[in-house]
Image (cartoon, helix red, strand yellow):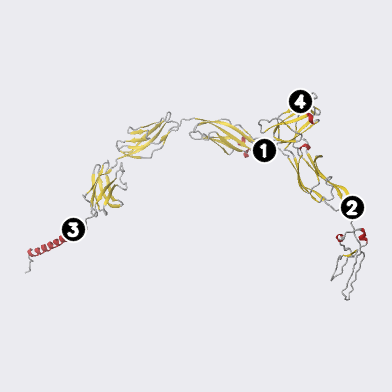
């Protein structure tokens, strides 16, 4: 391409293996906008050269050109407007709007006319105060909306309360001002105006729009480009398209809603005004989400209703009762079998309340009397409940004394006092009396014992013990087996050695007395020194009052203070009236053994003694042989 002597190579094909064909169905083109600063003069003098160069060999290649042309796009400044609109209609629900009824209030100097609230006498101030206005359950009043023919001649004030407490002072509010309270009172003061109506919305209904403007603002007249939001054909928002980026728009729309209307129309419209120099430009408005908040639905769920239970009467230690309950309850949504029941009792120590298969079970706790209240609550699945508090009376009953049983048979010794534990109590009385039907069975209330002294031996003697309070007596039979028992004791323990020494055999004599009323046979006597057994002896028979004696030979194996313990009837084979006096312990001082010299002399003397004895025996035999009669000879 030759542009006034400036050459530019547009394309070159080298070593082509197949034909290059731009004549059938397609053309070859190249954008040369950036090759020069084009003018019409330059374009008219432009030279385009198409040339084929051979390498010098013979070939049949040829270059065919049909035409060469220029495609020129001319940009002119232009002006115009583009617009777009989107609309959404929602139906089938009520608007969250509360219309204030002027008739439900207190008029003072005002009257209700065709235009609304107006002074009775023009120019004379009057007022109207509403009753307490209560929002729907779980909702708050959002914003207040009112119309006045002369805004300077009318004042609207609000007093609010939190959960039924004291109301605040009246505060002036503007049209569409947010209140956000559950309980309010409205006061309208008018001098020269007419207040058409007052509306309250719930929860401040709002329209949330999320989107973005992207592309380019080049060539766009931003001061005239905008987008608008319409709610029920009323303009709710106006936004210029003068900035690229994301946006999140929140619009209160309560003033555009009417009660009694079940249709909500949301429309978004945009206008793009162009003031372009001819350059290409694209601007886009994108709406990602549209959301309306503040609406609500109230579902009414009535409280359960159950049949009244009423007061209940019991006697102390009496039986409990079952009161049919769930099948006598009804609820508008929850089946009676699915109601949940809870109890609260003022005295848990007196009465126990619980549910058993749909019935209320009341049980009086043992040994209790008095008055208590029981609160029963029946809840449905939504948490609504029915409640009743009823009184329970438990009449006092004087309980009889309680006497523990005695063992089946208690062995006692004739003529010997025996103490038996008596266990008894009375939760209602303290002044109890205890008697027996035997003169020899005496009761000691201070120690709760019975002392029996049966005069003679008998196989089984019943003793009736009576425990009485002010109104009731309880009898318990004590069966005694009266027997005669032996009574063994160590009367005396003697050590037969004046100076006992280590290694000596020391006789220990034990005198055993049977002071009981029955004989004792095979009385074992055990002698023990420390942990070492010395001997076990036995006395074959001891008659009542008889004294027996046994001897244990004790050989101490070390000097010093030693103890000798003697125990009678260690295996408790003999039945005695007192088993605690069968052991006696004695301390003995043991001296050291004699020196070795004494022992040697003693040994020599012993050898000498044996020698003399042997010699004497030999002499006696010899004398016998000498002086005995001679042997008779046979003739």
Mark 2 or mark 4: which comes first in sequence? Answer: 2
Q: Which mark is residue 349?
A: none
For marks 2 and 1, give the one nearer the viewer.
Answer: 2
Q: Which mark is residue 126?
A: 4
Q: Which residue is identified by label 3?
A: 602
Relative depth, front residue between 625 and 556: 556
Q: Under tag 2, what secondary structure?
A: loop
Mark 1 or mark 3: which comes first in sequence? Answer: 1
Report how far apart the C-alphas of labels 2 and 1 lie in the structure: 74 Å
Residue placed furthest toward the top: 121
Q: Mark 2: few, some, or many residues within 10 Å (few <14, many ≥20)?
A: few
The total number of labels drawn is: 4
Location of the N terminus by quadrant is bottom right
Mark 4 or mark 3: which comes first in sequence? Answer: 4
Report how far apart the C-alphas of labels 2 and 4 lie in the structure: 68 Å
For marks 1 and 4, give the one nearer the viewer.
Answer: 4
Report how far apart the C-alphas of labels 1 and 4 lie in the structure: 49 Å
Q: Position of residue 276 (x, y in %)?
A: 86, 50
- On the image, which quarter does residue 92 sit in? top right
Residue placed furthest toward the front: 5
Q: Mark 1: few, some, or many residues within 10 Å (few <14, many ≥20)?
A: some
Tell whether 367 sits left or right of 311: left
Relative depth, front residue between 192 and 297: 192
Q: Which residue is identified by label 2?
A: 76
**Please, is residue 160 above or below residue 594 in the view?**
above
Q: Which residue is identified by label 1?
A: 333
Mark 1 or mark 4: which comes first in sequence? Answer: 4
For marks 4 and 3, give the one nearer the viewer.
Answer: 4
Mark 2 or mark 3: which comes first in sequence? Answer: 2
Q: Position of residue 308 (x, y in %)?
A: 60, 31
């Amino acid at each position: 391409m030759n542009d006034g002597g400036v050459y530019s190579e547009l394309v070159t094909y080298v070593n082509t293996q197949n034909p290059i064909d731009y004549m059938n169905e397609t053309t070859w083109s190249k954008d040369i906008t950036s090759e020069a600063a084009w003018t019409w003069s330059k374009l008219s003098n432009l030279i385009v050269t198409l040339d084929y160069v051979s390498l010098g060999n013979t070939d049949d290649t040829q270059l065919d050109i049909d035409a060469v042309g220029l495609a020129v796009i001319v940009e002119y400044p232009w002006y115009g407007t583009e617009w777009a609109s989107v609309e959404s209609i929602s139906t089938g629900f009520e608007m969250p709007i509360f219309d204030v009824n002027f008739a439900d209030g207190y008029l003072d100097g005002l009257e209700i006319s065709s235009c609304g609230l107006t002074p009775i006498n023009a120019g004379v101030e009057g007022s109207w105060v509403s009753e307490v206005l209560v929002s729907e359950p779980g909702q708050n009043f959002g914003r207040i909306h009112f119309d006045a023919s002369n805004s300077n001649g009318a004042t609207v004030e609000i007093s609010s309360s939190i959960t039924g407490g004291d109301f605040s002072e009246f505060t002036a509010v503007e049209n569409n001002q947010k209140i956000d309270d559950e309980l309010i009172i409205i006061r309208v003061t008018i001098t020269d105006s007419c207040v058409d109506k007052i509306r309250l919305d719930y929860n401040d209904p709002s329209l949330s729009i999320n989107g973005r403007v992207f592309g380019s603002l080049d060539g766009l007249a931003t001061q005239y480009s905008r987008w608008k939001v319409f709610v029920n054909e009323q303009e709710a928002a106006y936004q210029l398209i003068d900035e690229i980026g994301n946006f999140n728009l929140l619009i209160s729309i309560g003033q555009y809603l009417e009660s009694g209307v079940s249709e909500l129309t949301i429309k978004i419209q945009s206008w793009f005004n162009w003031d372009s120099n001819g350059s290409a430009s694209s601007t886009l408005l994108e709406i990602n989400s549209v959301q309306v908040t503040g609406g609500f639905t109230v579902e009414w769920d009535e409280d359960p209703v159950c049949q009244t239970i009423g007061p209940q009467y019991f006697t102390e230690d009496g039986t409990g009762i079952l009161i049919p309950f769930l099948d006598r309850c009804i609820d508008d949504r929850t089946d009676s079998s699915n109601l949940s029941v809870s109890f609260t009792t003022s005295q848990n120590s007196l009465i126990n309340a619980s549910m058993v298969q749909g019935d209320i079970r009341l049980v009086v706790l043992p040994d209790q009397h008095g008055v208590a209240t029981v609160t029963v609550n029946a809840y449905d699945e939504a948490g609504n409940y029915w409640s009743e508090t009823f009184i329970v009376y438990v009449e006092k009953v004087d309980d009889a004394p309680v006497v523990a049983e005695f063992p089946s048979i208690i062995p006692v010794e004739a003529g010997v006092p025996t103490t038996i534990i008596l266990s008894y109590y009375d939760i209602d009385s303290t002044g109890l009396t205890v008697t027996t039907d035997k003169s020899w069975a005496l009761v000691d209330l201070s120690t709760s014992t019975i002392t029996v002294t049966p005069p003679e031996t008998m196989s089984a003697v019943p003793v009736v013990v009576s425990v009485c309070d002010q109104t009731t007596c309880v009898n318990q039979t004590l069966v005694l087996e009266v027997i005669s028992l032996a009574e063994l004791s160590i009367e005396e323990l003697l050590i037969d050695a004046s100076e006992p020494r280590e290694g000596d055999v020391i006789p220990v004599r034990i005198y055993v007395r049977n002071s009981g009323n029955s004989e004792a046979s095979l009385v074992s006597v055990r002698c023990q020194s420390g942990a070492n057994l010395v001997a076990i002896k036995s006395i074959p028979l001891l008659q009542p009052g008889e004294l027996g004696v046994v001897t244990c030979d004790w050989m101490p194996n070390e000097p010093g203070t030693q103890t000798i313990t003697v125990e009678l009837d260690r295996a408790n084979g003999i039945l005695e009236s007192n088993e605690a006096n069968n052991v006696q312990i004695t301390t003995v001082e043991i001296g050291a053994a004699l020196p070795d010299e004494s022992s040697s002399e003693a040994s020599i003397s012993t050898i000498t003694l044996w020698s003399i004895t042997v010699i004497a025996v030999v002499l006696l035999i010899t004398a016998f042989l000498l002086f005995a009669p001679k042997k008779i000879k046979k003739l």
